[in-house]
Image (cartoon, helix red, strand yellow):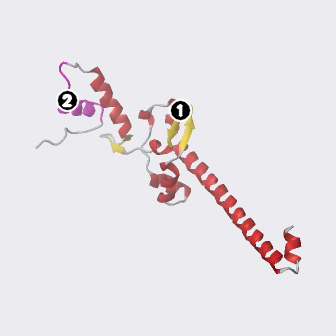
Amino acid sequence: MLNTYAKSKDKSMREASSFIKSKVESAKWFIEALQQREKLMITVAKAIVRHQKQFFITGDDADLKPLILKTIAEEIGSDISTVSRIVISKYIQTSYGILLMKRLFTEGLSTTNGEVVSTNKVKKILLECIESEDKSNPLSDEQLAFLLMQKNIFDRPPYRS
């Protein structure tokens, strides 16, 4: 139909042919853009899984390693804002449930032995300490800091004024 319209002597049929061609080209461009987006999302997801392998094995938040958007962006050769747009409102299905991809990024702390641990791991340690404390005599902030020092998270107590 498109070729018939294009060869027609009728001006309106040639215009219809031109209109159809432009819409077909727009549709092709849109399909290519969707395919490129899908490929990039898979690339980002694979990079995250490589970095967070232990978490995907155990499902334990304490096993999330410190990871920032910049690390993934550099690894896949993309811009931080592109990675951010991908993970900010997308989900990943795991054997532990469906998770917001952004949740797989965590901050890190350097320990006294030079290891970098995620803040999730520190939170888990603190939570375990608080859950096992005597509720009638809860641990003070200083005692919690001392417990973190014993686990080589900090090398000195927190600053006091």
Q: Nearer the viewer, residue 147 or 13?
A: 13
Secondary structure category for the residue under label 2: helix
User: Which residue is found at the position 88% from the left and 81% from the top?
Assistant: 9
Kind of residue at disc 2: Gln
Is 157 on the left or on the right of 114, as rendered? left
User: Which residue is found at the position 50% from the left and 60% from the top?
Assistant: 79
Q: Position of residue 18 (x, y in %)?
A: 77, 74
Q: Quadrant of residue 92?
A: top right
**In the rendered view, would you say 73 is above or below 45?**
below
**In the rendered view, would you say 58 is above or below 5?**
above
Residue highlighted by disc 2: 143
Kind of residue at disc 1: Gly
**What is the span of residues highlighted in magenta in the rendered image?**
136-152
User: Which residue is found at the position 51% from the left and 58% from the top?
Assistant: 82
Is 147 on the left or on the right of 2, as rendered? left
Quadrant where the C terminus sits is top left
Q: Which mark is residue 65?
A: none
Queried whether the magenta region covers residue 151, the answer comes back as: yes
Residue highlighted by disc 1: 97
